[in-house]
Amino acid sequence: MRAAGQGCAADPPRGVRGQLPAQGRLRPAAPVGPELPQAAPAPRAVRSRGHAEVPPGERPPFVRRVRHALEPKGARVRVMFMDEARFGQQGTLTAVWAPRGSRPTAVKQTRYEWVYLYAAVEPSTGFSSALLAPHVNTATMGTFLEVLSREVEPGDFVVLLMDQAGWHKARALRVPDNMVVLFLPPYSPELNPVENLWQYTRSHFLSNRAYQNYDHLLQAGCDAYRALTPEVIRSVCRCDYIERGS
């Protein structure tokens, strides 16, 4: 064994096959079999996640809670998802059709008016209920639940899935008798298909434009929501993981 500083060659990394000549330089062995061509890299959009990960075993209990909530209750059970989105004068910029070689531009405001769109959707039918408001808080959330409660058919029972925002879990929030609320696992936006609806709405109806004031934003939100047909909602909000977990 040589002491440190006497030019001892380092051992090759584990898993690397090669020949080590006397000079001490690693020469890779010839590859076994032909090399496979690699696909050229391409840009891919990514989605943001929370910094914390979902605890192990969190999602299977969630699916069991959904299955329990769907047990017969003497009424037609309707599974819906709920979420809120904020849009405002900051706006969204999206790609547009333009002549080759051109550099299209779009307006980008720096003002700070905005509105919140509350929405619940039933992916299986395309049914939806919505409310536009200037804030997200417990009082407005309660108002939205009352609106949803009145808009479903008499005798229907709603299983409403949503994330764990503070105003969703507030003690003061009153849930109507014809529904039950189930909370999605933390840091799991991909489990809520309403997230897809927000992306669709922003890119198709609320992008590359300017808004004069709050009233203009309110009208734009109403117009965008009314343009969402049940067929579009069924397509954009398709969700089958509950059936797969049953």
Image (tube, helix red, strand yellow):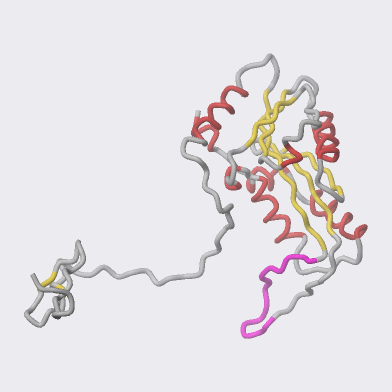
User: Is residue 139 a member of the stretch shown in magenta?
Assistant: no
Towards the viewer: 31 or 165: 165
Residue furthest out toward the bottom: 101
Residue furthest out toward the front: 3
From the top left corner, tell me how far across and down residue 189 is, in percent. Answer: 61, 47
Is 6 situated above or below 209? below
Q: Quadrant of residue 106?
A: bottom right
| Count of numbered circles on the image | 0
Q: For this view, does 73 lie left or right of residue 17?
A: right
Residue at 49% x, 34% y: name it. Answer: 244
Q: Quadrant of residue 10?
A: bottom left
Q: For this view, does 157 lie left or right of residue 133?
A: left
Is 26 situated above or below 148? below
From the top left corner, tell me how far across and down residue 162 is, in percent. Answer: 67, 38
Is 31 situated above or below 200? below
Q: For this view, does 40 lie left or right of residue 200?
A: left
From the top left corner, tell me how far across and down residue 107 is, in percent. Answer: 79, 74
| Quadrant into which the N terminus falls | bottom left
Q: Which residues are magenta?
A: 90-103
User: Magenta segment, principal secondary structure?
Assistant: loop
Residue at 78% x, 44% y: name it. Answer: 118
From the top left corner, tell me how far across and down residue 226 is, in percent. Answer: 81, 49
